[in-house]
C-alpha cells in the first residue's frame, strides 16, 4: 500500500491521509484518480489527456511541481509515501485545483498571441527548418501550458507581478517567428520591472519543464533583444 497525503480545501486547508494499493507502472495521476473514484468522490483535481499533451494535470508531488500523468510512483516515492498538493504560486480553488487565470493573463500581457503579417490571399510562408530563427521557434514551441515552470520559479513567489517563465518563453518564440509582426510592442511588454530582466537565471524552470524546454535560454534571448532595441533607440 501507498501512504498518500493529499491537500484538501483552500489555501488554509490541510493534508488528508489515504491508503492506496500499489500497481506496476502506476502514475501519480492514477493514485489521485483512485482516491477520487474509490475513497472520496469529493476530491477535486484536474486532468484531461492522460498522455502528456494537455498540461492540465500538474501538481506538487513531494514538494516538486510535476505533470502527474507522466510521473511514475517508482520515480518519486521512497518508502511508499507520497504527498500531493496544488501547484505553488497560484491561488487554490479547492483541493488540487488551482486558478490558472493569472498564469494565462500573463501570456496575454506578454503579447503571447500570434499576429501574422500576411493574409489568406498570400502563399504559404516558407521558413527553412535550419534557419536560426526557426531553430529558436522549434526550441520553445512545444510548451503545453502546464504551469510547472511557473510553480518552480522563486521570482514569481517574490514578485507576483513577474510575467514568469512560460509567458516569456512564449514571447521569445513569437519574436523569432518570421511570419509575425508587432515585435517592438512585444519587447516593450516584456521589458518592464515584471519582465525578462527580473529573472535571476535560477534555472528551476528549465530543470522542471516536463517538455525539456529552456525558458531560461528564452529569457536570456529576450534580455539581449531588449538591450539591443534600447541601444538602437527603438525602445
Ligand atoms: S530562470 Fe528565471 S524564470 Fe526560470 S525559475 Fe529562474 S528566475 Fe524563474
Ligand atoms: S515551459 Fe515547460 S513547464 Fe513551463 S508551461 Fe511550458 S511546458 Fe510547462
Ligand atoms: S493529463 Fe494531460 S498532460 Fe497530464
Image: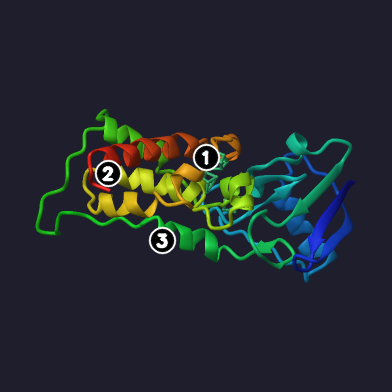
Q: Single out the mark in the foreground, 1 or 3.
A: 3
The answer to whether 46 is drawn above or below residue 224 in the figure is below
Residue at the (52%, 53%) spot, across then down: 162
Ligand 2 under 8 Å from disc 1 Cβ: yes
Q: Where is residue 32 drawn, in percent x and y?
A: 75, 56
Specify few, some or many for label 1: CA neighbours under 10 Å numbering under 14, 14-19, or 20 or more. Answer: some
Specify few, some or many for label 3: CA neighbours under 10 Å numbering under 14, 14-19, or 20 or more. Answer: some
Residue at the (52%, 35%) spot, across then down: 212
Secondary structure beneath dot 1 equals: loop
Q: Which residue is mark 1?
A: 211
Residue at the (62%, 59%) spot, across then down: 47
Which residue is at the front of the view, 130 or 101? 101
The answer to whether 69 is drawn above or below residue 48 in the figure is above
Q: Earlier in the sequence, mark 1 or mark 2?
A: 2
Q: Earlier in the sequence, mark 1 or mark 3?
A: 3
The answer to whether 233 is drawn above or below residue 57 in the figure is above
Q: Which residue is mark 2?
A: 177
The answer to whether 130 is drawn above or below residue 16 in the figure is above
Alpha carbons under labels 1 and 3: distance apart:
22 Å
Secondary structure beneath dot 3 equals: helix
Q: Where is residue 218 drawn, in percent x and y?
A: 42, 38
Q: Where is residue 154 drawn, in percent x and y?
A: 63, 45
Secondary structure beneath dot 2 equals: loop
Which residue is at the front of the view, 22 or 69? 69
Alpha carbons under labels 2 and 3: distance apart:
17 Å
Q: Single out the mark in the foreground, 1 or 2.
A: 2
Which colour assignment does the render follow?
rainbow
Q: Which residue is mark 3?
A: 108
Amino acid at each position: 500500500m501507498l501512504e498518500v497525503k493529499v491537500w484538501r480545501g483552500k489555501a488554509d486547508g490541510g493534508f488528508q491521509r489515504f491508503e492506496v494499493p500499489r500497481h506496476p507502472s502506476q502514475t501519480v495521476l492514477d493514485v489521485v484518480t483512485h482516491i477520487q473514484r474509490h475513497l472520496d468522490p469529493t476530491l477535486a483535481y484536474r486532468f484531461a489527456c492522460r498522455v502528456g499533451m494537455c498540461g492540465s494535470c500538474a501538481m506538487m508531488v513531494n514538494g516538486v511541481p510535476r505533470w502527474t500523468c507522466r510521473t511514475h510512483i517508482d520515480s518519486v516515492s521512497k518508502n511508499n509515501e507520497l504527498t500531493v498538493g496544488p501547484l505553488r504560486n497560484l491561488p487554490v480553488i479547492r483541493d488540487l485545483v488551482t486558478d490558472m487565470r493569472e498564469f494565462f493573463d500573463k501570456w496575454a500581457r506578454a503579447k503571447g498571441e500570434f499576429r501574422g503579417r500576411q493574409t489568406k490571399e498570400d502563399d504559404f510562408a516558407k521558413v527553412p527548418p535550419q534557419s536560426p530563427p526557426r531553430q529558436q521557434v522549434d526550441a520553445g514551441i512545444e510548451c503545453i501550458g502546464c504551469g510547472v515552470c511557473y510553480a518552480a520559479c522563486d521570482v514569481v513567489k517574490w514578485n507576483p507581478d513577474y510575467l514568469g517563465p512560460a509567458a516569456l518563453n512564449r514571447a521569445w518564440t513569437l519574436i523569432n517567428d518570421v511570419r509575425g509582426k508587432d515585435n517592438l510592442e512585444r519587447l516593450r511588454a516584456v521589458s518592464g520591472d515584471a519582465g525578462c530582466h527580473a529573472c535571476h537565471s535560477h534555472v528551476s524552470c528549465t530543470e522542471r519543464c516536463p517538455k525539456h524546454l529552456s525558458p531560461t535560454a528564452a529569457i536570456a534571448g529576450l534580455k539581449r533583444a531588449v538591450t539591443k532595441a534600447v541601444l538602437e533607440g527603438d525602445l
